[in-house]
Image (cartoon, helix red, strand yellow):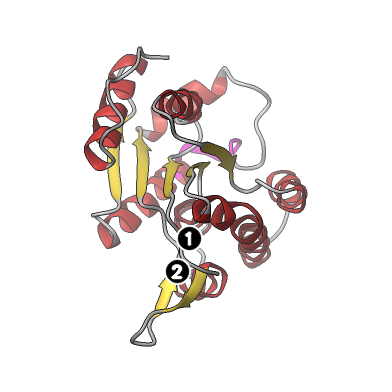
Amino acid sequence: MGTRSGIFITFEGIDGAGKSSHIEALADHLRAQGRTVLLTREPGGTPLAESIRALVLHEAMDALTEALLVFAARRDHVVSVILPALNRGEVVLSDRFSDATFAYQGGGRGFDFAVLDRLEQWVQTRDQGPDGSENLLQPDLTLWFDVPAELAARRLASARTPDRFEAQPESFFQRVIDGYARRMALSPGRFERLAADQSREAVWSELIRVVDARFSPFSPPVASP
């Protein structure tokens, strides 16, 4: 799949964590610094992947079918959108990526993590390194909006009609949180945990501090959204 020169940042967290309210603001902030920014999401990001998203969110299916569909959507997204943008030197901001699959299908649904690991290798391997090792596409930075499951449930209660995931009980979201914690423990250098039970302004301030520290210069910070 070639080499990349751009920056790949993902936003992760359970439904109701508040991540989506910050991704547009970060895109505007980076564009103001002269960056070309691609804003996308998962499942989705291409016409094919958006069609798969509708199935995953609204149609009943078993955990393996769900995982296979999510990774099929991701493959099209990676090949058609994410890698071309990174190769052009752009900043890609994605509302969720593969960590969500390990958190929701692995943690929430209890699906086999080993199978998810294998699917991730198949779908996200770009090429082989000089030593023959696989070169796996992963974000440069993953912003995990961590919020207690009970607070997320209260936020969702006043939101739109829930989809198949948003309608899950609080215990499901606690398992999803545990799935995210597992992924962070495996890749601590890639993750930054944001305490999303703070005010919107406090979360935004922390987000900008993290991004500026990782990819300077992205300063000065802009006003909170």
**Residue 180 image offset from top left, x and y in percent:** 37, 50
**CB atoms of marks 2 and 1 within 8 Å:** yes
The residue nearer to you, when weighing 30 against 175, is: 30
Left or right: 221 with respect to 171? left
Which residue does the image show at 52% across and 67% down from the upper left?
A: 124
Determine which residue is flagged by label 2. Answer: 113
Q: Secondary structure at mark 2?
A: helix
User: Please, is residue 172 above or below residue 98 in the view?
Assistant: above
For the residue marked with disc 2, what is the amino acid?
A: Phe
Marks 2 and 1 sit apart, C-alpha to C-alpha, by 6 Å
Looking at the picture, how far across and down is residue 34, in whole percent? 43, 30
Q: Amino acid at mark 1?
A: Gly
Residue 202 vertical position relative to residue 66 in the rendered view, above or below: above
Crowding around mark 1 (Cα neighbors within 10 Å: few <14, some 14 to 19, many 20+) is many
Q: Residue at x 71, y 58 (%)?
A: 61
Q: Is residue 40 left or right of residue 151?
A: right
Judge whether 51 appears above or below 26 on screen: below
The label shown at residue 106 is 1
In the picture, the quarter occupied by the C terminus is top left
| Crowding at mark 2 (Cα within 10 Å: few <14, some 14-19, many 20+) | some
Q: Pick whichever of labels 2 and 1 is earlier in the sequence.
A: 1
Residue 60 in the image, given as x and y percentages of width and height: 73, 52
Q: Residue placed at 39% from the left, 54% from the top?
A: 179
Kind of element beneath mark 1: helix
The residues colored magenta run: 166-171
Magenta region, main secondary structure: loop
Residue 129 quadrant:
bottom left
How many marks are shown on the rendered structure? 2
Q: Residue at 34% x, 16% y: name it.
A: 222
Q: Nearer the viewer, residue 126 or 155?
A: 126
